Image: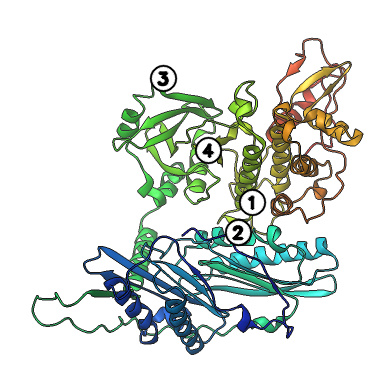
Amino acid sequence: MDPPKLPLLLVLVFASTIDAQDLFPKPYCGSTGNFSANSTYQTALTALLSSISTTNSLSLTYGFFNASFAVSGASQTLYVIGSCRGDLTSESCRTCLNGSASDIRHLCPLQKEAVLYSENCSVRYSNTSIFRTVKTDPDYQLFNVNNVTSPDTYNAALRTLLDRLRGETAGGGSLRKYATGNTSAVFNTIYAMTQCTPDLTNQQCIDCLVTVIGRLGPCCAGKMGVRIMAPSCQFRYETDDQFFDPVGEPLPPPPAPVADALPPPPGGKSNSNRTVIIVVATSVSAVFLVGVIVLLRVKRKKQPRQRVEGETVDEISTVESLQFDFGTIREATDNFSNSKKLGQGGFGAVYMGRLYNGQEIAVKRLSHNSSQGEVEFKNEVMLLARLQHRNLVRLLGFCLEGVERLLIYEFVPNSSLDQFIFDPLKHANLNWDRRQKIIMGVARGLLYLHEDSRLRIIHRDLKASNILLDSDMNPKISDFGMARLFELDQTQAETNRDRGDLYAMHGNFSIKSDVFSFGVLVLEIVSGQKNNIFRAGDHAEILISSVWKNWREGTISKIIDPSITSSLSTEIVRCVHIGLLCVQENVANRPTMASVLLMLNSHSVTLQVPSQPAFFMHSNIESDMSSTQDYNSRVSDVDRLRSKSNQFSNNEVSVTEPYPR
């Protein structure tokens, strides 16, 4: 569906000037084609929408309806989804859905797909499958015309509340994904609710809410109340709790799984007069599946545990469905031919391959002599198999056979960002729009790692060479070889050998380490320069210090890539500003990635004045130090230098403490 640009409605919440009846129902009639009046298609649609009033499915008890019709003679299937607010009673939900079903038939009489939003429910139908599929358009945006008095404080409290509710909603189970909560902000209490249709997976629900909540900035940041409804999810917040029940109606006890009764077909095999086949999903298969999973887990617990040396194999067996045969991968890469080699990483080489079905893959072959190879392999498989985000490189599978340990990824055709941004010719292909798109994509991927994935992850090695670009130049964060997990309530990861976590051997890491690396990346993208160390008389200067100096002197245009200076705009300067906030010396002053994404999305968010960035202060440089030494200034390099700092003499390099940890 290609909906028109949606108008923003000014809603005077709880005021008499605008009533909810004036705002709903809100239809969006599709533009993918029409069916003929009195056709089989129309008959099927009418029957499908009418079945809401008669169905006794378990899901409707929890505020959700889905069904499909196979249209005889039309080679098409119709799909309908109805969803009610999570605090609505089952009877109120049925009433709302019935009314919306009637409205959508009259307001979109011949369209093959449509969405209709009502005050307490929504109905949509399509001739393409919409079940278990994330749809965020068309959306319906409403906001309170009153502004908050302290937007920064209010937005920070709101962001924290919505982040918490997003996780609670996604974990709500397969019958209801709905959460409410409140928090204090300045002189107000913010009440909020978030909801997804329960057919979505946990991750799909998170992705949907991230997208829809991300529209808050461009739409109505700083407003006292906002409601954005999308086909698959919605959220709302106000400073008044009258719009929702904070406690919520308790979930009714699940009845015995009984299939919806369907009328038997006419006797005999003749069924030519029947033009519609009604298919209504039941919960029998779900109950059966749960039983199978329980049996498998019990069986696994009864199996004897392997010796310690075999624990890697034991854990990876949980994702054995992803396992590739070594011979298949060897054939796909022409026996790991040099002509197929894409590059060499810290733990092995990466090859391009092509499977028998024509699918292109990237294969990471861990070095046999790598002391951390097995741990690295286990870490990447167990993490990446659980991560799904459009801005992360996707793990397709693995191979574990003898000394061979392979990781199989999706193939990303446009190589890495450093091959473009630092290339004297290719960098011209990255105009500002593309660079901004890359910055936004990396921010979203990093936010997912920090807050939205099942496991909270610190990447620890974010840099231009680890950002891959697909055919549309969309960024994908790669190489989670340095990624380390940290507990949900931890703000900083520390070494814990009893638990087996492999954090920094020297120094501590936190999400603010990744924020620093992101800031460096932003400055590199804007300037087109690596964060190099170079000689400047008796001292050395890196990109960060150069940007900081020009920022303070009001000559920021000097560090911006000449190929995009013609489009010099407030967006570019704002990105430099955000980059400097990320690399501040004081770790506590650095923003979280959630705040960074909000700042990137919304110009209404006021940026703090950045303080001095963290960077090395060098002195007494030896003559054998190259005048232009490549330096990535990533946290991993900091630790490496710190670990050797006691070995340095006074005539070598001294490192000051205020560098990011």
Which secondary structure lies at badge 3? helix
Amino acid at dot 4 = Glu
- Rendered view: 215 above or below 567: below
Marks 2 and 1 in Cβ contact (< 8 Å)? yes
Q: Cα distance, mark 2 to mark 1? A: 10 Å
Q: Residue 661, position in %: x, y?
A: 75, 40
The residue indicated by pointer 2 is 210
> Could you say which is closer to the camera, residue 414 or residue 645?
414
Q: Which residue is mark 3?
A: 339
Q: Nearer the viewer, mark 4 or mark 2?
A: 2
Residue located at (55% from left, 45% from top) = 391
Q: Residue at x 24, y 74 (%)?
A: 277
The residue identified by callout 4 is 376
Q: Amino acid at mark 1?
A: Leu
Of labels 4 and 3, the one closer to you: 3
Q: Secondary structure under badge 1?
A: helix
Q: Secondary structure at mark 4?
A: helix
Precedes in sequence: disc 1 or disc 3: 3
> Of the residues tagged 2 and 1, which is closer to the observer?
2
Residue at figure coordinates x 67%, y 39% from the top left:
504
